[in-house]
Image (cartoon, rainbow, N blue to C red):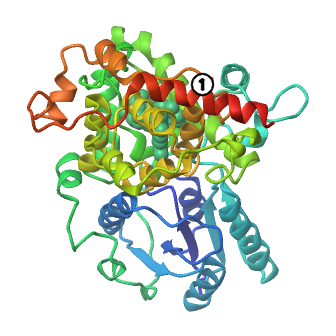
Amino acid sequence: MTAPSIVWLRDDLRLADNPALHAAVDRGEPIVVLYLLDDESEGVRPLGGASRWWLHHSLRSLDESLREKGSRLTLRRGAAAAELPRLVDDVGAGAVYWNRRYGRAARDVDTDLKSTLRDRGLVADSFQANLLFEPWTVQTGQGQPFKVFTPFWRACLERPEPRQPLPEPESLDAPATAAPSDDLDDWGLLPTRPDWAAGLRDTWTPGEAAALDTLESFATGALADYGDRDFPAQEATSRLSPRLRFGEVSPFQVWHRMRGDLPAEARERAQGFLREVVWREFNHTILFSSPDLATVSYRPEFDRFPWADVPDREIDAWRHGRTGIPLVDAGMRQLWTTGWMHNRVRMVTASFLIKNMLVDWRVGEAWFWDTLVDADEANNPANWQWTAGSGADAAPYFRVFNPELQADKFDKHRDYIRQWVPEVDDDSYPEPLVDLKASRRAALDAYETMRRST
Ligand code: FAD
């Protein structure tokens, strides 16, 4: 009798550079590859709508790749603490392997499972796969987590070079009898009534193969233009964010591609690009030490900020790109249509909500969480808090983005604005929801009120 290994995939929907899968192959027994949709464990944040869409397609693609290797994906749904041991029993598993995640609730689930499984005599091992630098390995001289990015980045560069990516397994041996599995379509991850995903389908092809293509075409193409990354009409960024979020590509693959053979103009940009990739590492380090990042201000005085009581109708105008401020509306429509928004415009739209409308950053964070295909437990709240001024190494609160000046600077010919707001010059386009000057003044007054109450 063989005792199969279970590889429990989570934020690592790939076959290449997957240490958990690699360990299972090395063990030599048949392998059950599991994805468990856990919307029941306490504190695990349910996925937003756009992420559910992405997950569906990425799982479908993963299953196809597994079948080409002689295996298949096993799907289960429920609280991991109950469902994983159930699968262990179903298949008589002797080992369970997974790659680590860094949110508190997920870590608690994993830690408990590891001891439960080990107590039962199974092998239960976890691996570093989704971060280049695990949070507890990059610390200040005093052994504290970094609160400022630049010294964090420097400390990362002083660490040993991240390991080389692992190859994908050539074949995968599956148990003779397939493990009982749910049907992906029964999970209802795709929107039906209404089906709002047409723009997502037009924009993206989820899955590992497309992720590797994206990395390769960026390295040999747009990377050379990365100096223009602040201009939203240009395709100068990688669009790897949902790939990294779902682990269709690993940061190790990204890192070493940037260290590999690149066209001459791209070579100059590679380090600047990796610096941005390391912001993702920084934000995960912040999440690791401040697990309530999505709900609690990192700088606690901001939880006394006098937010305005803004009617839903106005917040909806922001959500759907009808504020009458062209760059804000363009960004919010790009987000709604494609599930992604250019970074510069994310900053502008977030700043507008927080500072010109005086809406609590958590309201905006929740909307992005639901609509972004790259919605990430660390990056989303950390960037919202960065924009709000309440986060780690945040923009100072009093630096209020002026969306008109931002448009003049970064979308001078209004190409981006016209793409998403074609009616911008027509009479039908709404008047501005707020007066930019007066609302800026009100924001600075509100900040002073908070400071005085501290
Ligand atoms: P590139 O410029 O090509 O960067 C490469 C990779 O580096 C990205 O894929 C991402 O993984 C990482 N990266 C780049 N910029 C940042 C950053 N500021 N913070 C953290 N990582 C970064 N990014 C997310 O991945 N998920 C989110 O939920 C998210 N929410 C955001 C919310 C707000 C309000 C703001 C201002 C930014 C947010 N970002 C988020 C960061 C950033 O906007 C996106 O990572 C970036 O736009 C993705 O496009 P790209 O892959 O083409 O970026």
The foreground one among 360 and 438 is 438
Q: Position of residue 196 (x, y in %)?
A: 22, 61
Q: Position of residue 390 (x, y in %)?
A: 66, 36
Can residue 98 be seen? Answer: yes
Q: Residues within 10 Å of mark 1 (few under 14, many from 20)?
A: some
- Does residue 393 appear to the left or right of 37 in the view shown? right
- Residue at coordinates 43% horizontally, 34% vertically from top-left? 352
Task: Look at the image and tell me in which quarter the N terminus lies.
Answer: bottom right
Q: Residue furthest left?
A: 426
Q: Which residue is mark 1?
A: 395
- Does residue 408 appear to the left or right of 51 in the view shown? left
- Residue at coordinates 29% horizontally, 69% vertically from top-left? 190
Figure check: 140 above or below 175: above
Q: Position of residue 229 (x, y in %)?
A: 36, 20
Q: Position of residue 341 (x, y in %)?
A: 34, 38
The foreground one among 372 and 68 is 372
Figure check: 315 above or below 140: below
